[in-house]
Amino acid sequence: MTRSTRERIVDEALRLFAERGYSATSVAEIEAASGLSPGAGGLYRHFKSKYEVLAAAINEHAARTRSQVAGSLAELNGMEASVDLEERLSHLCRAGLAKVREESELTRVFFRDLSQFPELITVVREGLLQPMFDAIVTWFRAQPEYRDAEIDWNGISAVLGGSVVHYRLFQETVGESPGHAEKDQFVAAWVRLAVGLLPSPAPVS
């Protein structure tokens, strides 16, 4: 699919911000990477400033995340009748890992540059991170196997969702998997922990 000029600017700016940092990336460099004449002002026909490009990138990623989360939940809920619990859990975990990987450029910008833009941190928190944790709560509560489990699902989502985020962030920052656990090992362990939340069968009287 052909990207519009505006889309190219947003995508290339985010890539450059991730590689070099926000302050170290000039408008002319964004223009050149977007296929525009560097220094000719083409970016300003679509955005008022470099900051506005950054804000657009983050807001668009947040909007896409909300749509993706809704779609993933619908897909997972459609699996319930025909797929066993462990496979559903594996699918949930892998979807989370894929989403965090997809946001690797934004993650680097977040940790390097967003402390100077608290309003954009709010967008990341409310538009990207919290929807993922909320989706875990929604999913577990919808599963028949967990219906009778008296569990603090918000706390569980913080632990299970946090481990998914940490796994990818560790790879991004350190260059290898935490504990040297490959992805399939991590997913299997994640599923095992989640299955352990199942309520114990009632004793036979």
Image (cartoon, rainbow, N blue to C red):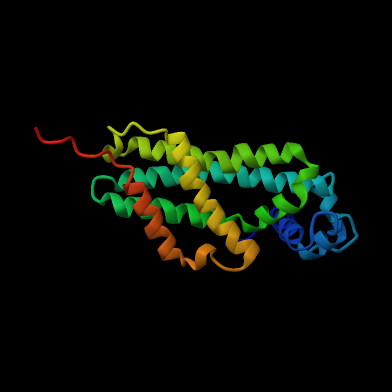
> In which quarter of the view is residue 116 placed?
top right
Q: Which quadrant holds the C terminus?
A: top left
Q: Which of these two is toward me, 36 or 169?
A: 169
- Residue that appears at 87% across and 60% down: 28
Q: Which of these two is toward me, 57 or 142?
A: 142
Query: Is 86 displayed left or right of 26 in the figure?
Result: left
Q: Which of these two is toward me, 87 or 9?
A: 87
Is residue 202 shown to the viewer in this render? yes
The mark total stands at 0
Location of residue 24 in the rendering, given as x and y in whole percent from the top left corner:
85, 59
Location of residue 4 in the rendering, given as x and y in whole percent from the top left corner:
68, 55
- Residue that appears at 54% across and 65% down: 177
Query: Is 74 displayed left or right of 198 in the figure?
Result: right
Location of residue 159 in the rendering, given as x and y in whole percent from the top left corner:
48, 44
- Residue that appears at 30% across and 48% down: 79
> In which quarter of the view is residue 103 placed?
bottom right
- Residue that appears at 57% across and 46% down: 64
Query: Is 32 displayed left or right of 131 in the figure?
Result: right
Is residue 101 shown to the viewer in this render? no
Q: Up-down: is 180 above or below 121? A: below
Q: Which quadrant holds the N terminus?
A: bottom right
Q: Up-down: is 62 above or below 172? A: above
Work out which residue is located at the far left of the displayed protein and give it: 205
Location of residue 54 in the rendering, given as x and y in whole percent from the top left corner:
75, 48
Q: Which of these two is toward me, 136 or 30?
A: 136
Work out which residue is located at the far right of the displayed protein and give it: 39
